[in-house]
Image: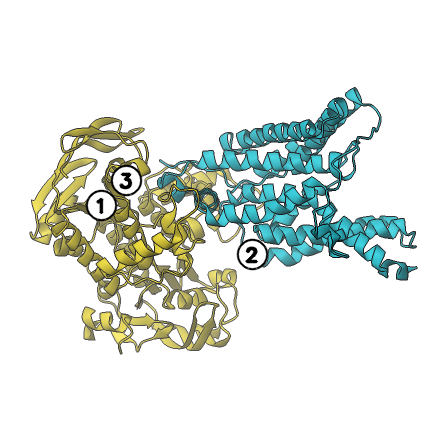
Chain colours: A yellow, B cyan
Amino acid sequence: MRIELRDIRKYFGPVKANDGINLVLEGGRIYGLLGENGAGKSTLMKILSGYQPPDTGEILFDDQIQHFSSPADALGKGIGMLYQDPLDVPAFSVNDNYLLGRDQRIVLDYKNASHELQEMTARFGFELDLQSRIENLSLGERQQLELARLLVGGAQVLILDEPTTGISAEQKEVLFGSMRKLAREEGKTLILVSHKLDEVQELCDEALVLQRGKLVGQTDIPCPNEKLVKMMFGQVPERSARPDFDLGEVVLELIDLRVPTYRLTIKDINLTIRQGEIFGFAGLEGSGQRLVLQACAGLLQPDHGKILLDGQDVSSWPYHRMQNAGVGYVADGRLEEGLVAGLTIEEHVELAKPKHSFFINRKVLFAITETKIEQFQIVGRPDSTADELSGGNQQRLLFALLRDNQKSILLENPTRGLDVRSSNWIWDQLNHRREGGTAILFMSSDLDEIFERSDRIAVFSGGNMSRVLETVNTSVEEIGHLIGGQA
Amino acid sequence: MIAELFTTTVLVGILASGIRLSTPYLFASLGETFGQKSGVLNLGVEGIMLLGAFAAFYTTFITENLWLGLLAAIIVGGIMGLAVAVISVTLKAQQGISGIGIYLFGLGMSELLFRKTLGTVEIVSGFSSIYIPFLSDIPILGEIFFQQNLLVYFAYIMVPVSWFVLSKTTLGLKIRAVGENPEAADTLGVSVSGVRYFTQIFGGVMSGIAGASLSIALLNVFQQNLTSGLGFIAVALVYFGGWRPLGVLVGSLIFSMVNALQLWVQVLNIPIPSDIAVMMPYVLTILALVIAVQRVRPPSALTKPYERGG
């Protein structure tokens, strides 16, 4: 099927999310859709998948004009979208989830569902337990299930939004394998939305680059990475270099630490972290790295072992005491754990103050907030609520709320979902902090980030921590092996 | 004196009236189960029951036709269910608060209508007992289970029917999906509002029948606040039953059995203060909820109005 987009425009108030996009997509090809945060990728894909209508412009399939009333309508006409967070029902069984919206008979046909699902999974080499509940599946498995459902639903065009975030290396291989199969053997059109250039290079036939709502580049793949980056940003932003730094005294010491949770228990964690050190935790989601960070922040209590902060035993200190002792924590659920959705920037600044008076001095608060907004380059006003900010600006706000002169800062996925420019800014801030002697501990699912930013690295796999690796003496390959649980 | 409770006649009597008294609980909480499964909490069940009870009683009193009475309760219940749907689904009101409004409306309105039309407590002859051939002749069991009125049988048939609809049919799947993840359901082409309107109207009808079962089958009278908190217990029973029809049945039976017991305690003049006896079901409600709440997870989207994102 040949798809044509003609002069697609979508404005949100003064923001031109899509500003006259013209595009032709042919069957049998894999397209990579690139662009920095806020370039209009998701808006365009939401329009194409029937989630929202364009303000003006036309969508044509094989020269026929199409109008979608809903995503279900779009799927009926052949366009399916795989969302970054799978649109499924966690409490459902695999079969129930598969049948939802598909089976229109009065009594559900479970036999047929199992049969169809088995066929699909076998065809694409998916490995998933069909008896399980959705909530017990991994992200990769849920993705495979969604893919199967879209294909059985008649998708000729598949849009995949950041599909490799949070899935294992094998699942990624299977996914890419099935994407190639769908394009080459079945003539389907695939659109990969991603900001990982390597993946686009590996998989796609052609790259489409959006910038500020306009299509600014279209090029065959393979082509040099620099060319793509230049199209995305207008210039090539350097990944800011990691300045060398002499480490100071020991700040944080973990001795034989054990933290039990109902899912996973981490044990025998021994670490020594010095002033100004950047320490990276690698590993698949849920391998235990987050638990270590949370234990250091006082959010989880270890049942064995010790945490020493400047030589003082702080194992049983709660979060607030740790905060006052100079340990800052930046969770990756920005709106879930870090910020309060309905509160304004100003109110966040007030709440984050170490001491409060009975009345809020609005004038002073306003002034402090304005300086913070300027200093941390947040796009927003003092009275913008946290949920109005973009992901990058929410992250900046979180950094603005961190107190000065921290002994240690703990971060979960500090640059998740951010483009190169925002990520660089975040790391500039952190590097600046380390020069003041702050120890930085962070976890990331982005291996390159771990490798480029850390002084030392520990890899987590199923609750076990590997030996500590010096970044200068290791390689991405070695870390990759350790992530997979191979020592 | 207590020993009088443990004669065969009395025990059979307690069990038979326990089965009978569970009818209003069953209707109301099965209806509410559908509603909550789809993510809408209707706290106004009690009010709808009162209106249903009055409509059934008054219609029967005037026309002397029980079926017209039942129909009146169904219609009034359906209209009230529609009102709940408009408030909770379309207007996206806070469900905890709007439910109290529905209850107070039902309480006041049924009392007003009662005063303006009947004025005094009257009696109708309600649905009479139906003896199921052969089964009702079985000693003890026959007397307990198979000599009940039509609405009792109907309530018990609704238990497996509700289970089947919720867990085996497309409609049930949609209801569950809308209660767990309305975004996903919407994207897959399920009408979130449509499903929730259906469950609310169905719940209203069931509450109406629950009221009718009191006024034209069990008690055969109408007076102000006839239901006296029964509708709230029905809502609690949905939690207690873990949003499953079978669980709701177990809960309903526990409460109605305790109720039957306290009635017989009063009938037999056993020297327990009647206030304490009457309190028993309510105390049990609180205890049961404390225990039950920790067992099962409610539908994720319960009480959350759905709005399609941009």
For this view, does A210 lie left or right of residue A55? left
Circles 2 and 3: CB distance less than 8 Å? Answer: no
Quarter of the image that includes the C terminus of chain B? top left
Q: Which residue is mark 2?
A: B296
Please provide percent x and percent y for residue A149: 30, 49
Secondary structure beneath label 1: strand
Towards the viewer: A57 or B42: B42
Image location of residue B61, percent across then percent down? 77, 25
Give the labeled residue for mark 3: A75
The one of A286 and A110 positioned closer to us in this rendering: A110
Q: Element under label 3?
A: helix
Residue A312, placed above or below residue B143: below
> Dot 3: few (<14), some (14–19), or many (≥20) neighbours within 10 Å?
many
Q: Note whether B140 is above or below A451 in the view shown.
A: above
Residue A85: mark: none
User: Which residue is farthest top?
Assistant: B116
- The residues tagged by marks 3 and 1 sit, at their Cα atoms, a distance apart of 10 Å
Label placed on residue A158: 1
Q: Answer yes or no: do the residues labelled 2 and 1 have beta carbons within 8 Å?
A: no
Label 2 marks which chain's residue?
Answer: B
Identify residue type, mark 2.
Answer: Val
Give how far apart the Cα atoms at labels 2 and 1 are: 37 Å
Q: Residue at x 44, y 40 (%)?
A: A344
